[in-house]
Every structure is written in structure tokens, then in C-alpha cells.
Image (cartoon, helix red, strand yellow):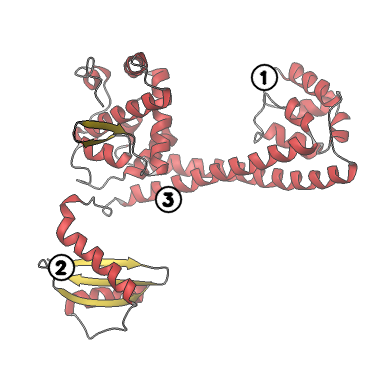
């Protein structure tokens, strides 16, 4: 068996090859790209003449990685081996979520700007999402307090198209916009309005691209053979289900047990013991995208699945905080998902919770 440590930089790879006894067979620096991969295959096959020496620190990193594989591979989780469709789901799902995060950042900038020069807008549109088409249309049409105060009911109504209770909403918005509010000097207001127009334009594009990528997420996820099993889980729809699949991956045998999957998810607690003192702590090192998806799954599941809700209520009855209870709910749901994927069966309430009714241990 050959053991390879790869310290990967942007434009090259520093590798070390060892045998099972730890004897170094080859060290080399390989270029990134097809030429480097071809060289890598050639090196493993024939152990060609020495390449250009890498720096000492890079050689040391490659050595540590190779040695880790040799001595601790039974403790390491497989990172490669996902199917092509799972990799595709990961690409579009991560891109979709990243755009949502970007939209949130720009929304917060928009809110901060409006608070500084146009607080009436925040008061008038408080029942609407600042990233909604309705608010964006209103801000394009009237980016200053003066322009907003002149909006007619018909203009506001046109911006609210597609919503319920438009007449009442339009009248309430007009009343707020025409009331007296604090503001900035005209020149400063003009400058802020220019920045708001820019932010509105960016958010408008992000809305469009998020919608486009959502369609890609749905299409790719729908092709995966485990989609039906994942969608049967409490609290998981297409988008959250795709995120869970993307971050767990689907390589066979990657998670030897439900506990291994829970540990990777970051939902299982860490127990530390020193003498007679034992503490249980949440895991702080985790995959942020996965833990976010699982937290949202737990939040949805307690609203729609009676067994999940009962488990959550039992935890709360023990004076466990909301977030800690959600972590334990998420941990339990990861175990259920693992069982369903292992057996190839969809979620069944009676089966999933029959032996958990009186077991509150995490």
C-alpha cells in the first residue's frame, strides 16, 4: 500500500509518498492542472528522478499528512467518493445559498442606509420584506422622503401587485410616508439615495439569480436516487433536503454508524471527564452549511411532526434552552436519516420513534 500526503497550494501540490512502514519513497512538487496530475500518476507508477525541491515547511506538511494516513487512517473519514449527481447538487446548492447570504448582506446595508436618511421607509414598509419586489419597486420610484411623500395610491398599488389586501396596505403606506419624520440635509439625502439605488439594483439581480439557481437545485436534487428518502424526513423540503445531501455526500461507507454521521454533523455533544467531573458541551467545530440546514430542519420539524414536537417538549420540560433543545432534536433527526438511508426506507413515524418514547439521552 502507498500512502500519499498532499499539501495543496493554489498553483502546486507538495506531495510525499510513504510505504506502510513509514519509509519515505518520494517527495515532489507538482504543478496544478493536467500536467501535474499526469506527473503524479507517473510518479506513483515509476518513482521517477527527483523533482525540484519544495520548501522545508511544505515538505514537512506533506510528510505529516502522509504519516497521518499511515498511522491513523482508521480514525479518518473518507472525503472523496461522492457520486457525480451528489457533486452537482453540492455545486448548485452552495451557489444558491451563497447568493442568499449575499442578498442578506446587501439588505442589511440597505436597512442601515434607510435608517440614516429615510426612516419613514422602514416604518412604511415594515410589513414587507426589504428584498421583496414590492419594496424594491417603491424605492426605485421614490428613493427620497420628498419623492415618497408624493406617491399616489395608484402608484403604491401598482408596486404592491400580487399581494393580498392591497387597498388597505397602500393607504397605510401612504399615511406613513406623508407623516413627519426625521431626515438629512438635501445634499446628504441625494447622496444616500444614490447608494440606495445601487443596492436596490444589486438585490434585484440577486433575486433573479437566486430564483434561477433554485430551479437548478430542484432539478439536480430530483435526479438523486435518495431524494425520496430525504424528502420524507420531517422538516425537509427540496431546498433544505438538497443542502443536507450536498453536505453529507453520498459516498458508500463514509459514515460507519449513525454516531459517525452525527459527529460529522456537529449535532452530537462532546463529553469531557476529569476525575469525578464530567461536562457535556456542544461541538463548535463543524460544517457551517450543514449545521445551518439541520437547525432549520429541526425548527420546521417541531411545527409539523407530532413525535418531534413531543420530544422537543420533553427536553424543554427539563429546563433545556430552545437552541440546546433544537440541537438535540437535530441530533436525533440525523440518526433517523442515517437509518433510513442505510435501509433504503422512507421515514415512518412509528418506526422512527417507537424505541425513543422514553429515551431522552442525546
> Which of the two residues, 292 or 278, is positioned nearer the viewer here?
278
Q: Name the residue under label 3.
A: 91
- Note whether residue 233 is visible: no
**Circle nearer the viewer, 3 or 1:** 3
Q: Where is residue 42 in the image (x, y as percent from the top left)?
A: 23, 77
The label number, if any, that marks residue 218 in the structure image: none
Q: Residues within 10 Å of mark 2 (few under 14, many from 20)?
A: few
Q: Looking at the image, is 288 positioned above or below residue 39?
A: above
**Residue 87 visible from this viewpoint:** yes
Dot 1: few (<14), some (14–19), or many (≥20) neighbours within 10 Å?
few
Q: Where is residue 157 in the image (x, y as percent from the top left)?
A: 77, 25
Determine which residue is flagged by label 1. 164
Q: Which residue is farthest front?
A: 275
Where does the image place residue 62, in percent across and percent down from the top left? 27, 68
Q: Is mark 3 on a helix, strand or loop?
A: helix
For the image, the number of numbered tags is 3
Question: From the image, which quarter does the N terminus lie in?
Answer: bottom left
| Residue 266 placement: quadrant | top left
| Image position, residue 21 (x, y; %) | 9, 68
Assign a secondary structure to mark 1.
loop
User: Which numbered disc, 3 or 1, marks the residue that appears first in the sequence?
Assistant: 3
Could you tell me which residue is drawn at 61 percent across and 41 percent down? 207
Q: Mark 2 points at which residue?
A: 2
Instruction: Report, in whole angstroms, how far the alpha carbon at label 1 lies from the one at label 2.
Output: 66 Å
Q: Mark 2 against mark 3, which lies toward the viewer? A: 2
Q: In the image, 237: left or right of 108?
A: left
Q: In this view, does 63 lie to the left or right of 202?
A: left
Label 2 and label 3: CA atoms lie apart by 31 Å
Amino acid at each position: 500500500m502507498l500512502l500519499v500526503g498532499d499539501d495543496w497550494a493554489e498553483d502546486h501540490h507538495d506531495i510525499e509518498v510513504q510505504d506502510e512502514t513509514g519509509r519515505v519513497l518520494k517527495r515532489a512538487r507538482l504543478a496544478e492542472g493536467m500536467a501535474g496530475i499526469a506527473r503524479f500518476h507517473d510518479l506513483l507508477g515509476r518513482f521517477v528522478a527527483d523533482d525540484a525541491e519544495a520548501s522545508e515547511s511544505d515538505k514537512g506538511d506533506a510528510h505529516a499528512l502522509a504519516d497521518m494516513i499511515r498511522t491513523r487512517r482508521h480514525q479518518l473519514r473518507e472525503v472523496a467518493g461522492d457520486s457525480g449527481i451528489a457533486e452537482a447538487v453540492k455545486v448548485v446548492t452552495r451557489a444558491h445559498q451563497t447568493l442568499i447570504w449575499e442578498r442578506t448582506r446587501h439588505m442589511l446595508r440597505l436597512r442601515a442606509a434607510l435608517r440614516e436618511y429615510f426612516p419613514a421607509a422602514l416604518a412604511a414598509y415594515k410589513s414587507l420584506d426589504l428584498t421583496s419586489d414590492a419594496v424594491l419597486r417603491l424605492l426605485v420610484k421614490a428613493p427620497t422622503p420628498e419623492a415618497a411623500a408624493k406617491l399616489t395610491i395608484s402608484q403604491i398599488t401598482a408596486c404592491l401587485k400580487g399581494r393580498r389586501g392591497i387597498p388597505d396596505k397602500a393607504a397605510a403606506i401612504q399615511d406613513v410616508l406623508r407623516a413627519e419624520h426625521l431626515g438629512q440635509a438635501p445634499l446628504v439625502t441625494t447622496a444616500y439615495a444614490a447608494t440606495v439605488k445601487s443596492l436596490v439594483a444589486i438585490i434585484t439581480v440577486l433575486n433573479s439569480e437566486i430564483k434561477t439557481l433554485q430551479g437548478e437545485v430542484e432539478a439536480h436534487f430530483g435526479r438523486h436516487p435518495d431524494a425520496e428518502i430525504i424528502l420524507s424526513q420531517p422538516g425537509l423540503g427540496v431546498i433544505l433536503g438538497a443542502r443536507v445531501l450536498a453536505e453529507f455526500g453520498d459516498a458508500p461507507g463514509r459514515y460507519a454508524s449513525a454516531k459517525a454521521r452525527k459527529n460529522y454533523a456537529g449535532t452530537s455533544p462532546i463529553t469531557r471527564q476529569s476525575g469525578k467531573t464530567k461536562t457535556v458541551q456542544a461541538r463548535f467545530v463543524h460544517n457551517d452549511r450543514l449545521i445551518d440546514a439541520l437547525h432549520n430542519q429541526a425548527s420546521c420539524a417541531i411545527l409539523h411532526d407530532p413525535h418531534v414536537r413531543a420530544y422537543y417538549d420533553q427536553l424543554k420540560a427539563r429546563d433545556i434552552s430552545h437552541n440546546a433543545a433544537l440541537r438535540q432534536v437535530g441530533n436525533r433527526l440525523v440518526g433517523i436519516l442515517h437509518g433510513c438511508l442505510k435501509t433504503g426506507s422512507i421515514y415512518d413515524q412509528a418506526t422512527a420513534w417507537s424505541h425513543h418514547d422514553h429515551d431522552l439521552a442525546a
